[in-house]
Image: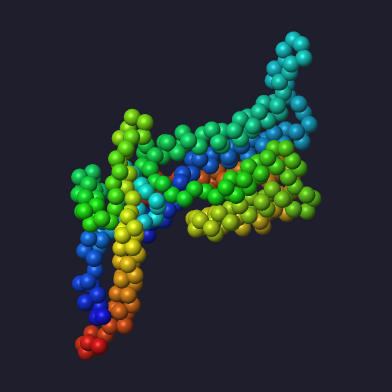
Amino acid sequence: MNLQRIHYVTQRYKRLQGLSNLPFAFCLLAVGLRDALRLDGQTITLLELPGAFTLRLIDLVGLVALGLMASVIVLRKPIAATYQNRYGYVESKPLPAWAWFLAFALLYGALFGEASVPSVSLFALTMSLLLGVLWQTHHLQIHYAAMAVLLAVLSPLLTHPVAAPVVSGGVVLVAGIFDHLLLVNTFTQGDD
Amino acid sequence: MEPFEELTSLDKLVHEPARLAIMTALAACERADFLYLQRITGLTKGNLSGHISRLEKGELLTVEKDFDGKIPRTTLALTEKGRETIVAYWEQMERLREAVDRWRPGEAPA
């Protein structure tokens, strides 16, 4: 029994439930896709009904992004319940409110705002700040620090409106997969 | 205190590896359920129950039984005494480690 790992995983059990990152990650990726379609300028029409209603691809992707944004909240409980049924329940101190606020401000900015200025991507810098602060205050795994540094370093290159949400979405996705694997590996070792 | 004296004075209730793992997990959170402790320690149900009974008897943890919907759930939490005991145990282990570092075989006791 690895006592250090038992302590680490128990203290961060909810934070390590990486599948809960997936809606947020896919939402960022959908935002990137919507912006790519908007910049492309070509409006692909998916459905045209007699009358005024037309459904374009960009509208559909925007709706999917909004749906995924809502699913960040809606899917929290079912995902937590899946982990609880499989690995059990741990009550610990919740994620601070400011972290949720920052995450949603980031998403809101990505969906409805101009998230970059000419010289540096504010979106990537905010994401880097969020990951770095979470890593420092919650003593998370080292990949959070590595991704925070990577996003900060790449922020001057991510000024294209599509780049920042796509790279940030990828980072959240990878972080979630690493966290989930740590949790699964810990319990698999316990089975031996 | 000599390292060997320190070693003999360790709290046996906590020093046993399975119970130490249970205490370590519970010290890292507010409370956890039986399933989590079983998964994280890798103990069997019977073995885990036995160790929990001993710790409960020593007033180091409390056991609560309730329902999560229709599913019965057993939740465990360290008592104040339990938290103090695990902190004292790790402090004692640290002192022991330092004493072993200083100790030279054949040296007269202080």
- Going 61% across and 43% down the picture, which residue do you hit? A169
- Going 72% across and 50% down the picture, which residue do you hit? A121
Near-viewer residue (A29 or A12): A12
- Going 20% across and 72% down the picture, which residue do you hit? B8
Side of B89 where A97 appears, left or right: right
- Looking at the rendered image, the quarter that the N terminus of chain B falls into is bottom left
With respect to residue B76, does B80 lie above or below?
Answer: below
Task: Specify the quadrant of the image occupied by residue A81.
Answer: top left
Q: Position of residue B95 (x, y in %)?
A: 32, 75
Determine the residue located farthest toward the top in the rendered image.
A50
Q: Position of residue A12 (x, y in %)?
A: 45, 51
- Looking at the rendered image, the quarter that the C terminus of chain B falls into is bottom left
With respect to residue A14, does B59 lie above or below?
Answer: below
Q: Is residue A172 visible?
A: yes
Q: Position of residue B107 (x, y in %)?
A: 23, 88
With respect to residue A40, does A165 lie above or below?
Answer: below
Q: Position of residue A152 (x, y in %)?
A: 66, 56
- Colouring scheme, one of rainbow, by chain, secondary structure, one colour: rainbow
Near-viewer residue (A32 or B13): B13
